[in-house]
Image (cartoon, grey):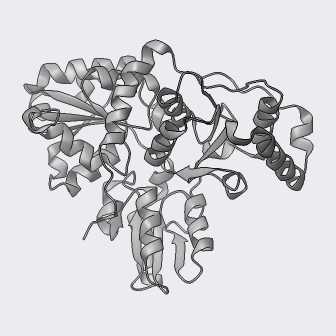
């Protein structure tokens, strides 16, 4: 990932009001040649300028549909912009307003290490292994997944992707004896349990150890091999927070993201992706109460949007994705001003040799339907 160049001083010296006025003017000047995509974890002042919003799966689908826009400005993080570049046409340009917007979870796995892991585990498994790679990963790992006959997934459709991976080839599946889930161990474990498996059906692969720290017996007993990775935002949520929020507001409905640790999901009422969480709050009756364990910008936006419902962050304090937060009004305006002048900055471009294989894995993700509602955990 390239370094972000310093913004000209004029962008950092503008007031928010001036930044907003100029962003609106730049959008109007670019017209239909521009599409701004915004992830749900973005701050409100940025999301207001998004033409389309969604989680990783929805934004991947939307990016693939944008055939008329010449410029896709992705207000998200780097792996999302990579996915958009893979899924859009050769004449379209994808820009990330701030190149510092990365993902620590995606950084926990690199393509050579995952390739080694598949070889090591494959030698121990005695069964066909199919990788299922969370969209929070690099384009290179997505390409490896495509070459290995696997698929990408998001937290919205991971359960159905796991089902596809384990389904026999004769029935349209991948015919896996085992799933290798990269890079979030919590998403893999929570999904396996929701499918009726137990934590004992999962084994964690630690890339810092020979053979991932796994014995042949451990690999053979497991149906799911989980890469040792996590999202730091969702690690702030704890079982004690669930107990405390229930004590403070009896009857409150607790929903957490499946990237949360297993012990938190166990105590919650349901787990779900951002889209599933949004849908649950939207469909709830007025007067309903929710404590939600996911990124604060989304939860606070839901609270503002549904004032007839009680909505709070489970932790009681902010759970912010710092990388997502590096996308701000000055960087957005800087990118748009350059596009108005006919200059492309911060383009995210995936190498041609990577694109074809990565697109196979991403297209499987898009083709496999999401689970519409949250998964009840009780």
**Most foreground residue, 212 or 153:** 153
The quadrant of the rendering that contains the N terminus is top right
Which residue shows up at 77% across the image and 30% down it? 339
Q: How many marks?
A: 0
Which residue shows up at 44% across the image and 32% down it? 137
Quarter of the figure with residue 179 = top left
Can the viewer see residue 182 in this picture?
A: no
Can the viewer see residue 252 in this picture?
A: yes
x, y (%) of residue 316? 55, 69
Quarter of the figure with residue 98 = top right
Q: Is residue 222 above or below residue 94?
A: below
Q: Is residue 94 left or right of residue 156?
A: right
**Most foreground residue, 153 or 181:** 153
Which residue shows up at 26% across the image and 27% down it? 212
Quarter of the figure with residue 221 = top left
Q: Is residue 173 left or right of residue 314?
A: left
Q: Is residue 267 above or below residue 160?
A: below
The quadrant of the rendering that contains the C terminus is bottom left
Q: Is residue 315 left or right of residue 218?
A: right
x, y (%) of residue 67? 55, 35
Which residue shows up at 59% across the image and 53% down it? 320
**Most foreground residue, 293 or 29:** 29
Q: Is residue 305 above or below residue 235?
A: below
x, y (%) of residue 362? 38, 33
């Amino acid at each position: 990932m390239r370094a972000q160049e310093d913004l000209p001083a004029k962008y950092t010296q503008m007031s928010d009001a001036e930044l907003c006025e100029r962003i609106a003017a730049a959008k109007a000047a670019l017209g239909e040649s521009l599409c701004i995509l915004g992830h749900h974890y973005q701050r409100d002042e940025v999301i207001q300028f998004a033409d389309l919003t969604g989680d990783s799966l929805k934004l991947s689908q939307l990016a693939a549909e944008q055939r008329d826009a010449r410029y896709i400005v992705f207000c998200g993080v780097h792996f999302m912009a990579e996915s958009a570049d893979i899924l859009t046409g050769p004449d379209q340009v994808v820009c990330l307003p701030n190149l510092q917007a990365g993902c620590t979870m995606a950084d926990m796995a690199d393509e050579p290490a995952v390739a080694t892991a598949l070889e090591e585990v494959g030698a121990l498994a005695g069964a066909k292994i199919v990788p299922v790679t969370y969209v929070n990963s690099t384009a290179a790992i997505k390409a490896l997944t495509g070459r290995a006959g696997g698929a990408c997934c998001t937290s919205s459709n991971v359960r159905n992707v796991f089902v596809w991976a384990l389904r026999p080839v004769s029935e349209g599946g991948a015919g896996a004896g085992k799933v290798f889930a990269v890079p979030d161990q919590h998403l893999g474990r929570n999904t396996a349990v929701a499918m009726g498996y137990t934590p004992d059906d999962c084994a964690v692969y630690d890339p810092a150890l020979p053979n991932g720290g796994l014995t042949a017996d451990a690999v053979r007993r497991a149906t799911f091999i989980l890469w040792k990775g996590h999202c730091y935002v969702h690690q702030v949520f704890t079982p004690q927070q669930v107990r405390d929020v229930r004590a403070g507001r009896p009857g409150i409905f607790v929903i957490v993201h499946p990237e949360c640790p297993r012990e938190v999901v166990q105590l919650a009422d349901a787990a779900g992706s951002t889209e599933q969480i949004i849908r649950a709050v939207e469909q709830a009756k007025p007067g309903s109460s929710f404590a939600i364990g996911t990124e604060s910008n989304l939860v606070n936006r839901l609270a503002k949007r549904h004032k007839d419902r009680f909505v709070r962050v489970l932790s009681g304090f902010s759970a912010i994705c710092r990388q997502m937060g590096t996308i701000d009004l000055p960087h957005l305006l800087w990118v748009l001003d350059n596009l108005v002048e006919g200059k492309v900055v911060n383009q995210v471009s995936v190498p041609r040799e990577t694109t074809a294989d990565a697109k196979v894995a991403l297209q499987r993700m898009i083709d496999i339907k999401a689970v519409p509602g949250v998964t009840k955990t009780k």
